[in-house]
Amino acid sequence: GQAPTEVDLYAVVRECTNPKRTGGSDWKMVVKIADPSVGTISSATTKAFTDIPINVFAQKEDMPKVYQVGDIIRIHHLKVSSHCDKPQFNAKIGMMPNNSGMSRCTFSLFDGPGKGVGEGASNDPYQSSLGEHTSESPAEVALRLDALRQYWSDVGAAAAQDNTFTISVSDIKSEQLFDLHCKVLEVRDVGGATVLFVWDGSDAQPFPPQDNTDSGGSTGGGATGGGVAGVEAMGVGAIGAGSTGNGSSTAPTSCVHFPQLGRQCWMPLQQDEPAKEWTPWFGTAFPVVIFDRAATENLPAAGRWIRLRELSCWIRDGQLQGLFVDRSKWAHVEPNRVWLDAAAERLETRQVAMWAPANQQGGMTRILHDHQPLHTLREVLMAAAPSRHHCLVRVVQHFPKDVHDFCSERPEGPKG
């Protein structure tokens, strides 16, 4: 028979993006859903799908507020459509355009298996849109919810694996777009720009401190080459001529508002303050500068794991920084166990600097007690005084410039 144009369904939320403004009065977010049948769905270009997207349009306050990946959504009167031979759904929540009445599409959100299957997880929705209801009995609802909680408990970890575009901070190259799966350390306002400090346990590649990626895609110091990646592909405006002539793209137009944005350093706490449970001692606090002003209206909280999609990057004062531009997106995700296991191994073996030379015997300095474990500078700054530390560091600058200025004349003592 003819395929339905509207459906009602229950499904697990596999991912949801942050809401963004549309060209009209609505906001838009994408909720990716899955259930046991999703692997049987295919198309001419895709053998099997891992999820199906719902394009949700609503006022910002009416949007689904999914607490965590794995939670369950019940949604009624969902429009069935497709895009580029891939199935998708469309949902208009709340008031229709021109105040022509309320949409028939409604939703409710329920706890996933994070609070247990059958025990602890509530069968009452923690959010419902206006007018949402079901004709099912409480027992029928409970059966559906428990089946989906069991499904996500069995396959959720595997289903939430990163795609091939997801890389670690240590693998970022200046010529490519990339996705990150990371923990938010802090959200900070810096001179009118918003900076996310994120962490995945690895170290960003260091560059000479005089290096800067300019709007033409080159760097002062000539050590890095390349430019701000993928801007032309995003359809974002560029400064100046719009292309470097060597195949790399230029910076987004909005970058011009922050020409003096330099190195961004993260310090979790003041000395002697107790560290938060999730304070990382190893790994770069990677700054991601947000140039999409609409995205700053709804940012993740510190301590949450997120996936950042389609980031670009530049170099400022030798520091690699991520760029969240018009096409970039973020979504809450579960912690990355692969990254956490690698970080735990680094901590155990005290591998404080991933980019340090493998052979450290020919270092510039000689020290006593070389057998002591190495500490990061973050550990040094967080340690209560007085303390002593054994560090492996890269020298980026020294003061004074002239070694003779370290010296002073010794006053002559009395003769005889």
Image: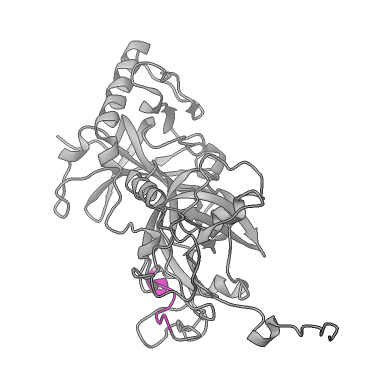
Image coordinates of residue 231 in percent, x first then y, are 42, 72
Within the magenta stretch, is there residue 10? Answer: no
Quadrant that contains the C terminus: bottom right
Image coordinates of residue 405 in percent, x first then y, are 70, 84
* Residue 44 vertical position relative to residue 103 in the rendered view, above or below: below
- Foreground residue, 339 or 148? 339
Image coordinates of residue 216 in percent, x first then y, are 48, 84
First to last magenta residue range: 223-233
Quadrant that contains the N terminus: top left
Give the residue displayed 58% in from the left and 55% down from the top.
388
- Foreground residue, 403 or 182? 403
- Foreground residue, 295 or 119? 119
Judge from the rendering whether residue 402 lies leftward or rightward of residue 93; answer left or right.
right
**Res. 325 in view:** no
Give the residue displayed 57% in from the left and 41% down from the top.
276
Colour scheme of the picture: one colour
Task: Return the residue found at the far front.
Answer: 416
* Residue 249 vertical position relative to residue 350 in the rendered view, above or below: below
- Foreground residue, 360 or 99? 360
**Res. 245 in view:** yes
